[in-house]
Amino acid sequence: MHQDEETHDQLMRAFAEYFKANQRWINKGTRQAGLETRYWLAQIRIIARDRRAHIQEYRHWLDATKAERKAAQNHKDQGSDNAN
């Protein structure tokens, strides 16, 4: 497993769109501008939830990999114990 940056990029693009929509809402105050701003906020929430889950999955995978390596190292050390 590797760190996937796709969701990070999606999040950054969504935030840029939110920023533009928010500026239109601040400057114009129209209903449409408010709808667009809320839409991008919702997209940010969805993408952030996916990104958070991916980071958690990666962390669990990393912990499991580390535990496997440690167990293999312990097994190797026990097998090569030569007491004279």
Image (tube, rainbow, N blue to C red):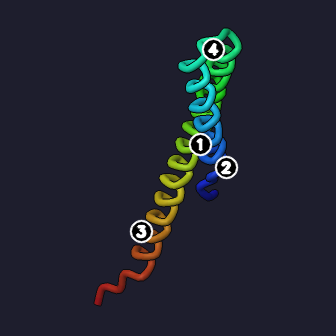
Q: Which of marks 1 and 3 is in front?
A: 1
Q: Please identify, in this view, whether the residue under mark 3 or under mark 4 is nearer the observer.
A: 4
Q: Which mark is residue 6?
A: 2
- Label 4 and label 1: CA atoms lie apart by 20 Å
Which quadrant of the structure image shows residue 42? Answer: top right
Q: Name the residue under label 1.
A: 12
* 54 w.r.t. 80: above or below: above
Q: Which residue is at a point 40% across and 73% down the rendered structure image? A: 78
| In the image, farthest residue toward the bottom | 84
Q: Residues within 10 Å of mark 2 (few under 14, many from 20)?
A: few
* Distance from Cα at disc 3 to Cα at disc 2: 37 Å
Residue type of the residue flagged with mark 3: Asn
Q: Cα distance, mark 3 to mark 4? A: 60 Å
Mark 1 Cα shell of 10 Å, populated few (<14), some (14-19), many (≥20): some
Q: Quick one: SS at disc 1?
A: helix
* Image point (61%, 31%), residue name: 20
Q: Mark 4 points at which residue?
A: 34
Label 3: which secondary element: helix
